[in-house]
Amino acid sequence: KRILKASEEESAEAAEELVAAQNEWDLVGGNSKDSKITRVLGGLGFVPEDYNKSCAEFSGGWQMRIGLAKLLLSEPDLLLLDAP
């Protein structure tokens, strides 16, 4: 095992960085954002196995669903859709 010792100054700096990162995470929605993404994707028919696939692996219709998911997750005040 290798044990690294940090100085008090380094520890304080690391703690400040951690607090800043946590604040930023909370500001953008934190864990609630992950659950919203899961809910939107599930509502559009995606399964968890799809989450890490490249967009190029999906057919054109599924790529349209990906685009719709992006729109829904942006939380627009108004969204007008025209059915093809």
Image: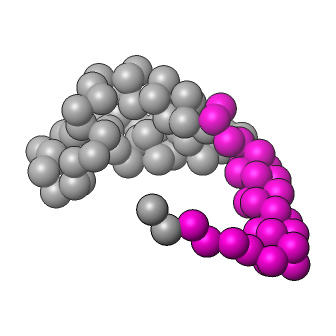
Of the 4 image quadrants, the one containing the N terminus is: bottom left
Q: Quadrant of residue 73?
A: top right
Q: Position of residue 23 (x, y in %)?
A: 82, 53
Placement of 4 over or under 47, stated as above or below:
below
Q: Residue furthest front?
A: 1
Verify whether residue 12 appears in magenta: yes
Verify whether residue 46 appears in magenta: no
Q: How many marks?
A: 0
Q: Is residue 79 visible?
A: no
Q: Position of residue 71 (x, y in %)?
A: 51, 45
Front-most of residues 50 and 3: 3
Q: Is residue 54 left or right of residue 18?
A: left
Q: Is residue 81 left or right of residue 14?
A: left
Of the 4 image quadrants, the one containing the C terminus is: top left
How is this picture coloured? one colour
Q: Is residue 21 visible?
A: yes
Which residues, given as a range, are shown in magenta?
3-32
Is the magenta region chiefly helix, strand or loop? helix
Q: Position of residue 52 (x, y in %)?
A: 27, 46
Q: Position of residue 41 (x, y in %)?
A: 39, 30
Residue under the point 41% across and 41% down:
68
Residue under the point 12% across and 45% down:
59
Residue under the point 71% across and 51% down:
25
Front-most of residues 3 and 59: 3
